[in-house]
Amino acid sequence: MMKGIFSVLWMAPGMALGELAPMNGHIDILPRYLNGQWSWSLDAPSPIGLVAAGQHYFPGVDGDFFADEGIRFTRPEGDFWDILGVAEEEPLWIFPESIPSGYEGAWLGLGDTQTGVFSGVVRLSLLGVDGPPGGHFTMFRDDGAVIFATADGITAADAFNKPAFHTHVSWGFSKKGLWRVRIVASAFLGPGQTNPTGPSPASPLYFAIGNQARWRAEQFDAAVVMNDAIAGSDADPDADGLVNALEYVLGGDPNSGSGVGPVHGGSIHPQAGMNAGKLTITFHRRQDSSSDMDLQPIAEWAYSLNGPWIPGGTVLSVVPLAGGWERVTLRDASGDVAKFARIRAVPVP
Ligand SMILES: [Ca+2]
Ligand SMILES: [Ca+2]
């Protein structure tokens, strides 16, 4: 996986920087060539309509596709599907080529080619994919045609002669997280295979799978969103002592040192207290504890700052708040009296 080395390529004229915005529904990707220059656009349902590429992300929910909960599938049996980069029976996440009626997620096609501009096809090549370490991206069609696949490296074979008409494809990812897929277009202006256009700038397409990745896409602008040193789980870009993973689970703003959570309006720093002679800790968490949430906060207790840290606690109160949040107070449940308590962000099982 390459990181960050092409960050100037997508700052093409007319593309503004800013936080990424979600885009759902039927979306067509349009490489276009006008006045000797390539550009990339996205054609989305109203009210978004036609916009320059590079400013939106496609949200994916980690839930069973067949139960209408999200875009999680299971890798089929058979050696052919090794190309997806996951073992048989393992999960993978697919923005699908074909959808059931009423589907509200993002499904992405390649739009109609401009008429009267090119001689022959528009060739799309995979320039690079950034995403979770060890993850793989595959673009394929339901008939089994593999168009792009990173599990066997990115080579000249990762190319597609796009038909003139609008066509949909599946976009598969082997891990949850935030992904950037960059595609380059080229074509001939003719007559025949003459007058090549040269390659287009790379189009960044952002896919955010799982609640934490969607949160990341909404918190950081395109210039830094793929930079783990700023937007990654372990980073603390606002230097308030809470790494982004803790900002995420406690409802903080990763770009502000404010101690008040912008969504739930309470303290993002856990508060210590006493109840019946025992230590308590109060913190905020999401009411949703589905796998889509990725991380959740748990309380741990210790007699010394060096540990051992023992997870658990007796629930004293759970107060529902706006925006799907709640405020929780736990009390030390040990026989002795703990002197220290902390909150740790752990994966949702
Ligand atoms: Ca922070
Ligand atoms: Ca913060």
Image (cartoon, rainbow, N blue to C red):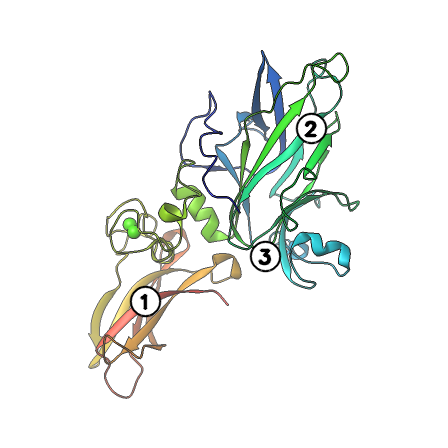
Q: Residue at x 69, y 35 (%)?
A: 159
What residue sits right under mark 2 in the picture?
123
What residue sits right under mark 1 in the picture?
343
Q: Residues within 10 Å of mark 3 (few under 14, many from 20)?
A: some
Q: Residue at x 56, y 43 (%)?
A: 129
Q: Quadrant of residue 111?
A: top right
Secondary structure under tag 3 reads loop
Disc 1 or 2, which lies upstream in sequence? 2
Mark 1 or mark 2: which is in front?
Answer: 2
Spot occupied by residue 68 in the image (x, y as percentages of width and height): 64, 53
Secondary structure under tag 1 reads strand
Q: CA distance from mark 1 to mark 2?
A: 51 Å
Q: How many marks?
A: 3
Q: Quadrant of residue 103?
A: top right
Which amino acid is tagged 1?
A: Ile
Spot occupied by residue 213 in the image (x, y as percentages of width and height): 47, 49
Marking on residue 63: 3
Which amino acid is tagged 3?
A: Gly
Q: Under 8 Å from ligand 1: the CB of mark 1?
A: no
Mark 2 or mark 3: which is in front?
Answer: 2
Q: Is residue 239 left or right of residue 56?
A: left
Mark 3 or mark 1: which is in front?
Answer: 1
Asked whether the beta carbons under mark 2 and mark 3 sit within 8 Å of each other, the answer is no
Disc 2 or 3, which lies upstream in sequence? 3
Asked whether the beta carbons under mark 1 and mark 2 sit within 8 Å of each other, the answer is no
Q: Residue furthest bottom?
A: 335
Q: CA distance from mark 3 to mark 1?
A: 26 Å
Spot occupied by residue 23 in the image (x, y as percentages of width and height): 54, 37
Q: Residues within 10 Å of mark 2 (few under 14, many from 20)?
A: some
Q: Under 8 Å from ligand 1: the CB of mark 2?
A: no
